[in-house]
Amino acid sequence: MSSTILVVDDDAPIRVMLRRMLEEEGYDVALAADGLEAISYCERDMPALVILDIGMPYMDGYQFVEEFTRRGWQGRARVLVLSAQVRQRTDLARIADSIHGFQPKPFEVEEILEAIRGLLTPLE
C-alpha cells in the first residue's frame, strides 16, 4: 500500500483541482476518470485513500465500491465519497458499510481537507 490519494471523478476539471489542492498539502495524488480505471490502479498500487465520485460512466461509484469490497480491499484503503448526486446519506445505504466518509459537492476546501486528514490515520 502506498500513501497516495486516488481521485476518481469523470469531471476532468474537478480531478485537476483536487490534485492541485492535495499536492499543495503535501499529498501524492493519482487520478482516474471512472471506476474501471480506479480498479486497475488499485490492482497495481493500493492507495491509502480513494476519493470517489458516484456518477461516472463505465463503472459508477456504487459499482466501484461493490467491486472494491468483493476483492477484500476495504481493509487496505479508505474510501471517501465526494458527490453532488448523493444529497442524503440514506442514498448511500447500499455501500454504507464499505465507505469511510461522505462529503457533498460543492464542498468547502477546509472541510474536505479535514475529512482527508481524519481518514489518513493508520488503518487498524
Image (cartoon, rainbow, N blue to C red):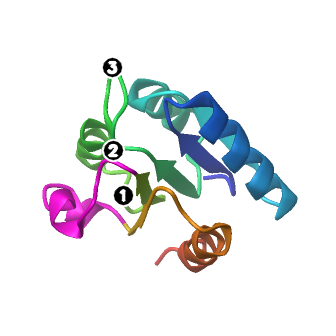
Which x, y percent locates residue 83?
40, 51
Label disc, if present, on residue 68 of the rendered structure: 2
Q: Tag 3's secondary structure?
A: loop
Outermost residue toward the top in this view? 58
Check whether the beta carbons of the residues at disc 1 and disc 3 lie within 8 A of each other.
Answer: no
Which x, y percent locates residue 115?
55, 74
Mark 3 Cα-neighbour bin, 10 Å: few <14, some 14–19, many ≥20: few
Which x, y percent locates residue 23?
82, 53
- Is residue 91 rendered to the left or right of residue 81? left
Span colored in magenta: 84-99
Mark 1 to mark 3 CA distance (whole Å): 21 Å
Q: Quadrant of residue 87?
A: bottom left
Label disc, if present, on residue 100 of the rendered structure: none
Question: Residue at horizontal 39%, vertical 63%?
Answer: 75
Which x, y percent locates residue 98?
27, 60
Q: Earlier in the sequence, mark 2 or mark 3?
A: 3
Mark 1 Cα-neighbour bin, 10 Å: few <14, some 14–19, many ≥20: some
- Is residue 69 rendered to the left or right of residue 5? left
Label disc, if present, on residue 58 of the rendered structure: 3
Count how many numbered circles sit on residues in the image.
Answer: 3
User: Does residue 34 sit above or below 53 in this rendering?
Assistant: above
Q: Which of label 2 and label 3 is nearer to you?
A: 3
Question: Residue at horizontal 52%, vertical 27%?
Answer: 33
Evaluate whether residue 122 shows in this view: no
Residue type pointed to by label 3: Tyr
Mark 2 to mark 1 CA distance (whole Å): 7 Å
Evaluate whether residue 95 shows in this view: yes
Q: Which of label 1 and label 3 is nearer to you?
A: 3
Q: Tag 1's secondary structure?
A: loop
Q: Earlier in the sequence, mark 1 or mark 3?
A: 3
Q: Quadrant of residue 48?
A: bottom right
Q: Earlier in the sequence, mark 2 or mark 1?
A: 2
